[in-house]
Image: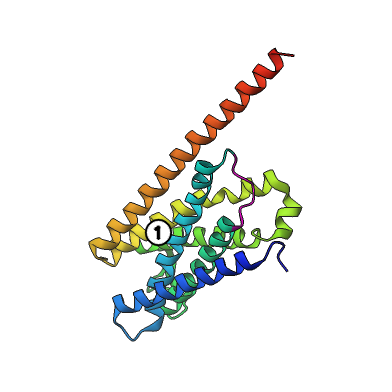
Amino acid sequence: MIAGFGKARLLTHFTLALFTVVGCYLAFLYTRRGDLTYTLTIGFGYICLALLVISLIIGPLKLLRQRRNPVNVYLRRDVGIWSGITGCLHVIAALLDHRGGQILEYFFRFTADGGIMPLLNRSGIANYIGLAATILIVLLLVTSTDFSLRRLKGKRWKALQRLNYVLFALVVFHTLIYQQVSRRERLFVEATTILIIVVLIAQIVGVYLYQGYQNHRLRKSTVKEATR
C-alpha cells in the first residue's frame, strides 16, 4: 500500500483515469476508423504528452504559492505515473497497429540479400527517439514508488526524476516528426507548439522564483549573522 494514499489521491487517480477515457474517446471521434489499435495509438500518445506537460508545470505553480518546492509532491508524481502508463500503452498500441508487432521492422531495414540496415528515414529516427523515451518512462515509473523514494533518499530521487525534462524533449521530437510523416492536421502541430511554449514559460518562471527565494534566504542569513 502506497503511503499517503487517501481520499484525495483516490480522487486524483479517478480524475486522471477519466481524463484518459475522454482522451481516447476524442481520438475515436477524430479517427472515425474501426481500427482500435490506431485509435488508441493516437489517443494514448497525445494523452501522455498532455499529462507530461501538466506534471512539469505543477512545480512552478507551487512556487507561486509558497517559497519552497518539496521533493515529493503527490499530485505531480501521480500525474507523472499516468503519463508513463499512457506512454507505455501508446507504444504497445503502435507496435500492434503499424507492423503487427514486428518490432525489428521499426528500427531496421532488411535488404533482398538478407542484410540488415538501420532504418534512418524520418519514421526510423522517430522510432529510435521513441525507444529512448520508452526506456526513460519505464525507469521513471519504476522509481515513482515510495520504496524508491526511501531507498534513494530525497536528493538522489529528485535528481533522477529530473529526467522528466529529457523525456519531455524526446516525446516532443517524436511527436513532431510523426506529425510530419503522418501529415497530421495543422491543429495538432499548433497544439503541440502551444504545449511546448507553456512548459518553457513555466520553467523559466520556476527558475526565476526559485533563485529569488534562494537569494532572499541568503540575505536573511547574512543579516542574522551580522547582528550576532
Percent position (x, y) of residue 122? 34, 60
Report the residue marked by disc 1: 174
Q: Is residue 46 visible?
A: yes
Position of 80 with respect to 183 (left or right) is right
Percent position (x, y) of residue 62? 53, 46
Residue at 57 percent of width and 69 percent of height = 11
Q: For the C terminus, give its image quadrant.
A: top right
How crowded pointer 1 is (Cα within 10 Å; few <14, some 14-19, many 20+) is rated as: many
Colour mapping = rainbow
Q: Quadrant of residue 77?
A: bottom right
Q: For the N terminus, give its image quadrant.
A: bottom right
Q: In which quarter of the image is residue 227?
A: top right
Q: Which one is in front, 197 or 126?
A: 197
Residue 70 falls inside the magenta stretch: yes
Residue at 34 percent of width and 63 percent of height = 178
Tell me: residue 178, above or below residue 68: below
Percent position (x, y) of residue 136? 56, 57
Residue 120 falls inside the magenta stretch: no
Q: Quadrant of residue 21?
A: bottom left
Percent position (x, y) of residue 6? 66, 66
Q: Which amino acid does label 1 sit on?
A: His
Say what secondary structure mark 1 lies in: helix
Residue at 36 percent of width and 47 percent of height = 197
The overriding secondary structure of the stretch rendered in magenta is loop
Magenta extent: 68-74
Tell me: residue 167, above or below residue 37: above
Tell me: residue 77, above or below residue 201: below
Q: Which one is in front, 31 or 2?
A: 2
Q: Which one is in front, 227 or 130?
A: 227
Q: Can residue 115 be seen in this view?
A: no
